[in-house]
Image (spheres, coloured by chain):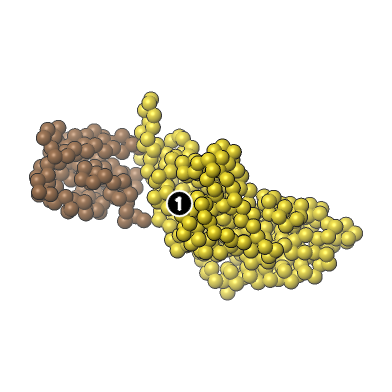
Chain colours: A yellow, B brown
Amino acid sequence: MLSINEIRRQFPILGSNEVIYLDSAASAQKPQAVLDAVHRFYTEDNANVHRGMHALAEKATVDYENARRAVATFIGAAKHEIVFTSGCTGSINLVAKTWGKANLKKGDTIALSVLEHHSNIVPWQQLAEEIGIILKWIDIDEDGTLLLDDFANVKLVCITGCSNVLGTTPDLKLIVEKAHAAGAKVLVDAAQLVVHERIDVANLDCDFLAFSGHKLYGPTGVGVLYGKRELLENMPAFMGGGMMIGHVTKEGFTTAEIPSKFEAGTPPIAQAIGLHAAIDWLSKYSWEDIQKHEQQLINTAIESLKSIKGLRILGLPQTGCVSFVIDGVHPHDLTEIVGRNGVSLRAGHHCAEPLHERLGVNASTRMSFGIYNTKEDIQKAVQEIKAAMQILKI
Amino acid sequence: MDLYAENILDHYRDPRHKGTGDGATVSKEEDNPSCGDRITAHLWIEDDVITKIEWEGAGCAISQAAMSIFTEELEGKTTTEVLKIKKEDVYELLGVPIGPRRFKCALLCLHTVKNALAPQSWLETVEIADK
């Protein structure tokens, strides 16, 4: 059983402001342990990594590589299968622009779901523009459940682990099995999923998995790409620069071994160390307790929101967030007004325009949850939504 | 104990088994791109047994002394035995503390000799136990 008060006390921003923060799907707040780790790195250990023989360089390198090990353990991967990137978007772009370019050709089909975030759509559309691959969309039913077809002739399946709008969680294990049976690889966008349930890539058997640090209570500016070793080894390098090379001559270059091959330039060192602290911090709590708590939040949200006249919840939310529309109220007006009283909700299409088009709505309002949220947060938000509707005279 | 212990400096100043490898069964060059250490191993192999070893190289004291010390262990071993040598075995031979900033210097000897016998990446030669 989680003590939410004890958890909340560890988040300075939740104590110092009158904040009802219900926007963790956009970015989660950071516990003191993460802030301390980043601060400690800059005040005590700051140096570049893999580039010096002095003591600070060694400490920075060890800490950075320990962060990689922590991420690997967290998701059940091997250490060299973890590439640090700038974020989930950076990770997916890396796959599209290296594995994609090297393994896909004109006329090849990749499948992606209508649930996807733009970061798991646009890199593939760019590749379609560039080399002529074909994008096959996986549709959903009214509940937001994927309507899975077989993956015949599909080379890659790009799928979210949890919709950032509907809060629905596709059956990843089934999708991986079906994809592999058809000879397709699978890339999982775990940006939302990673903070809500345990991920084990070895068990899931996905080929790539991407997520960001900042939605996992860690710093912005760092993301993770997991890739199976054999795939990473056979992919061309992404950005060129220091660290990713074996040798450079006037004639050309050779690449470093994985994962350095994909980490050109000075990596996000402090951020990776902060992410390590976030993982250690989150790991103090059991997934079972976290999921139980967050499930209660979702249930409370669904129940309370349903009491609002003219409000319709989109899909059947399972994990992380609840999105809704209210007749006659634009989400931007709603979130602006409730925001004045400290309630942080998100409005718009949440970087998922094709999904909103499929749902037949221009925009929605999203309430999303972190480990630190309480039923009182939700009740306050619902009160403020009702008050805002009064102001808008709906 | 200091990294620059007497045995390390002794092998660095007076490396054993240096030679250009004329007539060797197999020769293989490997390097450490980040710091420029470079080693070529020349192995004479008869009936799967290493009967003689010579080497050439340039680089830091640790990488060169480690190769010199390592070569003293190889003659008479089968190739299978050599491929099973672990990084911990090399550390033990060197007898000095090898930290994270010098492990590639210290293990270039192992990486080079193993590659002379079978091509493999650093992940196989030294870090596989580090998964």
Q: Which of the 4 image quarters holds residue B107?
A: top left
Rendered residue at 21%/54% (across/down): B84
- Choose between A373 and A187: the one closer to the eye: A187
Q: Which of the 4 image quarters holds residue A341?
A: bottom right
- Choose between A136 and A388: the one closer to the eye: A136
Q: Which of the 4 image quarters holds residue A288?
A: bottom right
Q: Position of residue A182 (x, y in %)?
A: 48, 56
Mark 1 belongs to which subunit?
A
Residue farthest toward the top in the current orientation of the protein? A250
The answer to whether residue B83 is above or below residue A292 is above
Q: Secondary structure at mark 1?
A: strand
The residue beneath circle 1 is A227
Q: Quadrant of the N terminus of chain A?
A: bottom right
Rendered residue at 55%/49% (across/down): A110
Q: Position of residue A215 (x, y in %)?
A: 59, 55
Rendered residue at 65%/60% (across/down): A140
- Choose between A310 and A332: the one closer to the eye: A310
Q: Quick check: B32 left or right of A314?
A: left
Q: Quick check: A158 left or right of A386?
A: left
